[in-house]
Amino acid sequence: MIDLTVSEDTSDDARARRNVARLAAAQALTGANSAVIFATGAIVGVTIAPSIGLATVPISMYVVGLAAGTLPTGAISRRYGRRAAFLIGTGCGAVTGVLGCLAILRGSFALFCLATFLGGFYGAVAQSYRFAAADGASATFRPKAVSWVMAGGIFAGLLGPQLVQWTMDVWQPYLFAFSYLVQAAVALVAMGIVAGVDLPKPEAADLHGGRPLSEIVRQPRFIAAALCGTIAYPVMNLVMTSAPLAMQMCGLTVSDSNFGLQWHIVAMYGPSFFTGSLIARFGAPVIVAVGLALEAGAAVIGLSGLTAMHFWATLVALGVGWNFGFVGASALVLETHTQAERNKVQAFNDFLIFGLMALGSFSSGQLLANFGWSAVNLVVFPPVLLGLCVLALVWSSKRRDARLAAVDAAERG
């Protein structure tokens, strides 16, 4: 673990707590924007895409935007501060809504994909909210800060799908057009919130300080943390992306898929009220392992039936598993770098996660169309097993090294 200075251990968390409140609110509004894309992207894609196999491409473009936005977000944060990155991100969110509306009105698949790509860039910026919450916080408060910001997403689970439900029929026959216009307004509200975040200003050390990135990412703990993050999030995205279209293919309604997505998002973010405390008590590796096991359990449920209840249960279990896996992996990443190294390491970690998600997302539509919902769920098991094995090996080695160091210290004493 990276050694912490005395000032870090005893820092006043008052400012960090104020930032957590704002960032949690911004997380909620950003989550509502992404919920609109996930709830409607595949359905709009079926309507305006050249073929059904391309129906999930707009959601894949969202994930590409997530991957493409991570490294620029880190670079902007290092040079100009996190708040500048937040304002740019929310601006992209507003443009997403306007372009999405125009794309539906004009029936332009390419324009709709551009809109969701910018939505992904907005999402990439928002992913740094969880790490920003830890800036200036004491070591003991950091896991809770990350967790509480993620908890803001529970409001997204209530607002996002309901926003779609309330607005999808407003401009008939252009289904969901008005939903995207409202999405733009929500992003502008988020812009006002992040403008008031009080974060440390960039220092010269943030640009050139610390160890080389190549040295940091070779640490076994970073490899395990990044690998678990790149499994927990892409696996969740694969199943969630496919679920609304799979439900439609099984004869279920848009209301059914909206309901399932709503509770999926609640399950994703609701546990964040106590995930930080669980990490503090049991350790991040244990919570990550539980999260990955829950994602595998969600796949088991998905394989057991095709009723609305099966889909809903799958999405809820998937959401809780993602929360434990992703928040736990994020807490592990915080243990692998110093303050001066934070932006480049966190941005690289997210680039790995969303880069892999982008690759997987492009195959989800073809996987569902060609092999069915069962194949989507079967794909979950190999990466989850890999993640559990690597996590067990790295932390078993860590405990063994700690015991040997203690024995060595005792012998010298």
Image (cartoon, rainbow, N blue to C red):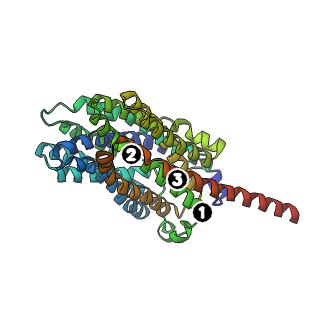
Location of mark 3 (residue): 228
Q: Please name whichever residue, 54 or 78, is drawn nearer the observer in this view of the structure.
A: 54
Q: Which mark is residue 98?
A: none
Query: Which three-letter amino acid code belongs to the residue tagged 3?
Result: Cys
Q: Which comes sooner in the sequence, label 1 or label 2?
A: 1
Q: Residue at x 59, y 45 (%)?
A: 141
Q: Are marks 3 and 1 in contact (CB under 8 Å)?
A: no
Location of mark 1 (residue): 220
Q: Are marks 3 and 2 in contact (CB under 8 Å)?
A: no
For mark 2, does the 10 Å Cα neighbourhood hold few (<14), some (14 to 19), or many (20 or more) residues?
Answer: some
Q: Residue at x 40, y 32 (%)?
A: 305
Residue 239 position within the rendered picture, expressed as x and y whole percent measured from the top left: 39, 43
Task: Give the answer, above or below, for where 104 lies relative to 166.
Answer: below
Q: Looking at the rendering, in which quadrant would you find the N terminus?
A: bottom right
CA–CA distance between discs 3 and 2? 22 Å
Location of mark 2 (residue): 375
For mark 1, does the 10 Å Cα neighbourhood hold few (<14), some (14 to 19), or many (20 or more) residues?
Answer: some
Q: Specify the farthest residue to the front.
A: 371
Task: Give the answer, above or below, for where 34 lies relative to 219.
Answer: above
Task: Give the answer, above or below, for where 163 lies relative to 6.
Answer: above
Closer to viewer: mark 3 or mark 2: 2
Q: Looking at the rendering, in which quadrant would you find the C terminus?
A: bottom right
Residue 203 position within the rendered picture, expressed as x and y whole percent measured from the top left: 49, 65
Q: Is residue 293 visible?
A: yes
Query: Which three-letter amino acid code belongs to the residue tagged 1?
Result: Pro
